[in-house]
Amino acid sequence: MTRPLTDNMEIFAGLIVLIACCCSLLISNGNEIGGCSQTNNFFQYTNYRTSYHFQPSRNWINDPNGPMYYKGFYHLFYQYNPLGAVFGDIMIWGHSASYDLINWFHLNHALCPSEPYDINSCWSGSTTILPGSKPFILYTGIDANGRQVQNLAMPKNLSDPLLKEWVKFSGNPVMTPPNGVKKDDFRDPTTAWQGSDGEWRVIVGSRSNNQGIAILYRSKDFMHWTKFQNPLYSSERTGMWECPDFYPVSINGTKGVDTSVLNPSVKHVMKASFNSHDYYMLGTYNPQMEKFFPLTDFEGTSSDLRYDYGKFYASKTFFDNVKNRRILWGWVNESDSRQDDIEKGWSGVQSIPRQIWLDINGKQLLQWPVEEIETLRGKQASIDDKKLESGSVFEVSGITASQVDVEVVFELPELEEADEFINPGLVDPQLLCNDKNALIPSRLGPFGLLALATEELTEQTAIFFQIFRGHNRFVVLMCSDQSRSSLRKDVDKTTYGAFVDIDPRQEKISLRSLIDHSMIESFGGGGRTCITSRVYPQLATDKAARLYVFNNGTLGVVISSLNAWSINEARIGEEESFKV
Ligand code: DQQ
């Protein structure tokens, strides 16, 4: 039977459409067709999603907002664009809750623009739990005139431990930009602290005459706020302060303290986010003068202390009174392009929550992944007492190298033979890491880990140390070299670096890395120096990814111990998926 011509034409037209679809699919899936160069594809993008770091199921996230513990649940709010994978004209507060800081379920959005004082966005802020277990959110609203103002919100139902609904205060805004402060330079209120006079204090990030400032406000009832005559702190060598954080840390030990604690057993931390990094100062808070006195002011140089020397921004801490610890969260941005983010449908990850405390020497903070991460540990690989001769590379096998928690401790039997550190003045460690990358040998180093590597090492992210002999001390450099992290050409491969304040004569050199598909969070010297990087390998993904220990120095080093655990996927999803 012959078909009518129109039928045949329909079939033909259908075939054309089918072929066209297949071609465009193939092209967009990255195979070479008619000379089209390889492009990124969806399959590849799915490999970049993390498996145990916090991410919503889609779209853009940035700053962590108002983390806290309330009636059995940890709460994490975050800057979220519900409409896409790029920073949005309208930003809201996403909200998720967890029993253990690792597995999370997503809840209704906590704050969305709805009133003249926040109609253009609900930007970052903090929570404070008032006596009687009453949490309050203080957040920045972008008002109808594009002004940044501070607003209050409280839970609708205090007996709901999930705090699903939030009500905005009828007296909003509670703070507006003061004289001399531009309307878009006034944001990100901190968690409040209470003085011995019973009054609440809070700081708001700002700038005046291009000086970063922490504007201080005080309140007797948490609803009516008055600006104090002087800022709590101002710094000449920074621009606008975003997301300030101000809190006490114990002088002795790893335990955290409540934000209102003020006594001789604590020092204060002042953190500010600027120039794409989170910087902090240690110092003393004088409540009579309402002033913070740092040990050293920000210098605007590489000697300023940072939480993390890689990608880590707009962070926030909270005091976890269940385990008496202070916990730090930070936003880890992508380093691929905006177009990549749109195509993959998401952008931004939160760091692993880190416990944070003061080093016993009082000179810096230390950080370590919260212990709960260990509940995800699966298969283990261990190596003890293994010499790594010059030029050796050794595979850590038996684990899933794309999802792993690895800790290695190095011994340096020939420490005294290290190269001399030629120091003509201030040396920027990041530049040094760029010069002395993972392939360039000195005597002691580079040695460390090769993460998310291919078998042939064509792709690899090297996290490594170099040790130098300085004047009366040793200099320990830690680097994260992304230059060979991906065969892709279109991603940022900046190399990061920082010094580790450790004496290798007294202590072995340790490195812990949390590797999660496109995320590598590294903790050097027991958490003295942290470097987080984002990498997008083309081949070293999922089962193809490998983990190695290496030594490219001319002197041998010894792996004193190495333990690596495959990390199981965390449960991060909708609330329903948590119900049994
Ligand atoms: N992100 C928020 C602001 C904050 C900035 C907007 C820091 O409140 O200053 O999403 O990343």
Image (cartoon, grey):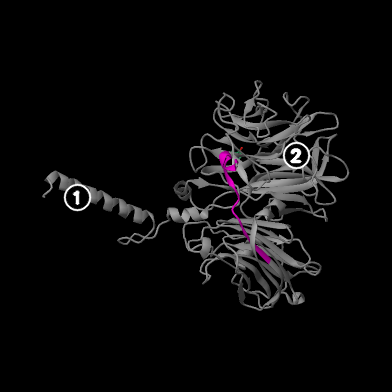
Relative to 526, does residue 227 appear above or below in the rendering?
above
Residue 110, magenta (yes or no)? no
- Front position in the image: 527 or 1: 1
Q: Quadrant of residue 446?
A: bottom right
Q: Quadrant of residue 516?
A: bottom right
- For label 1, the residue is 12
Residue at coordinates 57% horizontally, 23% vertically from top-left?
A: 116
In the structure shown, which secondary structural element does the residue marked by tag 1 occupy?
A: helix
- For label 2, the residue is 233
Relative to 518, does residue 574 appear above or below in the rendering?
above
Q: Residues within 10 Å of mark 2 (few under 14, many from 20)?
A: some
Name the residue type under label 2.
Answer: Tyr
Q: Quadrant of the C terminus?
A: top right
Disc nearer the start of the sequence (2/1): 1
Return the residue found at the far front.
580
Q: Is residue 72 visible?
A: yes
Residue 567, magenta (yes or no)? yes
Name the residue type under label 1.
Answer: Phe
Residue at coordinates 42% horizontally, 55% vertically from top-left?
A: 41
Where does ligand 1 appear, by image quarter? Answer: top right
Highlighted range, magenta: 563-579
Q: Is residue 153 visible?
A: no
Q: Quadrant of residue 219?
A: top right
